[in-house]
Structures are given as structure tokens and as C-alpha cells.
Amino acid sequence: MTIKLKPLKDQVIVITGASSGIGLATAFAAAEKGARLVLAARNEQALREIAQEINDKGGQAIAVGADVGRQQDVQRIADAALSHFGGFDTWVNDAGVSIYGRLLEVSDEDNRRLFDTNFWGLVYGSQMAAMHLRNRGGAIINLGSVLSDTAIPMQGMYSATKHAVKGFTDALRIELEEEGAPVSVTLIKPAAINTPYPDHAKNYTNRKLTLPPPVYEPEEVANAILYAATHQKRDIMVGGGGKLMSLTNKLAPGLMDLSSEKLMTDQQLLDEPAQHREGTLHQPGEGGRIHGRIKDTMPTSMYTRAVTNPLVAGAVVAAAGAAALALMGKKRTSTNGDRYKPTNTKPEMVEVVEIVEEVHVTPLPPQRPL
């Protein structure tokens, strides 16, 4: 069924994990489009400052301190949206934590905490949103990962949470469609994104953490999220490099395993000693930062721009392979990250992804506001 979604200027949007990274980038982008915002994260002080910044610029935002791994906290987020704005139109489940470590070394306590946030927090948010939206209509947007489609060493349990997120999200979409509920359910699958993610991860190694290339900027994910808030879309991969990984795993899983075995561990570790090893797994992070510390990033993804452009149909997306594979051989370097767009980004870095399939992008019917 075709679902009509409101323009952003007429929406109330709930964003979990809104104090940093992708969630914060999405909050600022949505505020610029006129959306009213309910921002949720564990670091309530950082959230209040972010909400105040948005309000000072003429937007409308409220902050709700919440741990999405606790169902009662998710209820408080929904209650705040109802009491302040009369409800919501889009719910974005972005909150997430991470662990770098081998599966046989990570403690059960840490693994359970990872699932509490990444999986159960998303489940609680999706259930809350579905109950609210099944009659009035709207969108549920869940943050998966390229690791919803494949897996890599050192982040094995994180990969497992994102596989679980994909399975839950797909089943929820089917069930809501089966009952005729006017709810769009989208899975966003980012590749490696230049956020404070490595700084926030629980670190079981003795080396500083980084991300395997190619690495994209969080604004590209925010754009995809806001596209999904206004267009009915099943899933969106952010980053042609992620599409290449997913496709390789599908068509040549043995090759993907071998590549991960030979390359991925070293590409996630810098030749610098680890500093803050506990991360934000069990306690809130500092908040307020959108960007991470990686210098060489791709500011845009031509692949993602193509698949989120309803005018592009039946196109063969020439996207990331040569550049992605060249970047995969690089050692990562770091720089200071902040909440603004980094000046070290190469503005015209070409993303060439050689995908062995045609990507047919079927334009959706014109959408009218409710």
C-alpha cells in the first residue's frame, strides 16, 4: 500500500541517540526544515543544551533524558511527545553503543548491555511508535548498518545486534502492511560513518580504535533519514562502499570472509595506545559532537544520492569500487573531531563503486501531505 507522509515542516519527529553523531546531525537537519523535535539520549545535560541551541535559532525542540534499554524510559519519551506536541509523526531509533573485541573475550555483561541498547531499545521504540502511528499514520526509521548484511571481526556482537535489528524491522514492516496500517517502516544501513563511534566504543584491545574505509560523513546519513521520513522506502544503504560489501557478501561470501580475515582487524586499530577503554557502553558520553577524528572521508555518496532520488529510475549506479578498494588499503589517521563539518574533508573525492548489478530505482507515486 502507498503511505502518505507529511512534509518535514508539518512533522513532530522523535530522535533517540540525539546527543551526538548521526542523531545530532539529524536533529539539526530536521530543525532547519522546520520539524518539531523530541530529542532523547542518556546525557540529559547535553540534550538540553542542544535543544536550547535549536530553540534559540527559531526551532522547536524538547529534551528527554532516557536510556532506551529501559522500557519505562521509552514510554517517557512518547509521553513527552504527547504532552508537548500532541503526538509525533516519525520515530527515529538511532541510539546505539558498540564494543571492539573478540567474541571469546567480551564479557556476557557487556554483550547483554549491547543488546539492551541496540536491539531491545529499538524494539521498545518501534513498538511504542507503531501503537501510536497505526491509526494516524507516519514513519518508523530504524538504524541498522552495513553489518546488518555481513559481519566483521572485532565487532562480532555489534554485527549480531544489527542482524537482529534487520530481522525485527523487516517483520514489523510486513505485519503492519498485513493489517493495513499506514506506517512506513525503513531500515537505514550506514557504512562506516565519521562520528565519535570509535571513541564511544568499549575497547578490549590495547590500541586506539578507528573505522575501516571508506568512511562517510554523518550528514549523508541524516539526509537519508529525513528522506525516509517523507518517502515510503523499505531500506536505504548509505555509502557505495557499504553496498559493495553487502553485494560481495551476497555473491561471493567466501571472498568476503577472506577479505575480512586478512584486512578488517588491522583496519579498525590505529598504531597508537588505547586511552579511554570503557567508552559509553555503561555510562553516557560527553555529547555535543557530530563528527569523529578521521581525516580522509567521503563527504557524499553518489550511490545513496541516486537511490534517494525518485527521478532516477532504471539507472546503473556506477559507484564506489576503485576508490573504495584503494581506500581499503590505507592506514587510518586521526584528528580532533567536533560538532561542525570538518575542514580536512576532501571536497571532491570521487566515489567509484563497481557494483555488479543494475540498481533499479522505482520512483514512488507523488506524495501529498496528510
Image: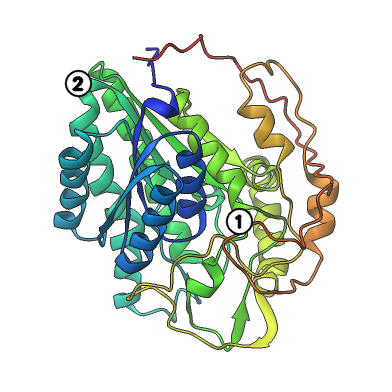
Give 258 or 301, whichever is nearer the viewer: 301
Rendered position, 274 above or below 295: below
Frontmost residue, 313 versus 295: 295
The C terminus - image quarter: top left
Task: State whether residue 86 is above or below residue 117.
Answer: above
Comparing 102 with 310, the one in front is 310
**Quarter of the picture holding the N terminus:** top left
Query: Relative to residue 47, is residue 256 drawn left or right?
Result: right
| Mark 1 element type | strand
Q: Residues within 10 Å of mark 2 (few under 14, many from 20)?
A: few
Residue at screen point 16% across, 52% down: 76
Residue with the mark numbered 1:
193
Query: At 59% from the left edge and 67% from the top edge, which residue is drawn?
Result: 338
CA gap between label 2 and label 1 equals 35 Å
Q: Which quarter of the picture shows residue 117? A: bottom left
Q: Answer whether labels 2 and 1 touch (C-beta < 8 Å).
A: no
Q: Who's the residue at 76% across and 58% down the image? A: 345
Residue 227 lies, in percent from the top left, at 52, 31
Tell me where residue 105 appears, x and y as whole percent.
44, 82
The percent coordinates of residue 361 (x first, y second) are 63, 20
Residue labelled with disc 2: 135
Dot 2 falls on a residue whose secondary structure is helix
Q: In the rendered structure, which amino acid carries the disc numbered 2?
A: Asn
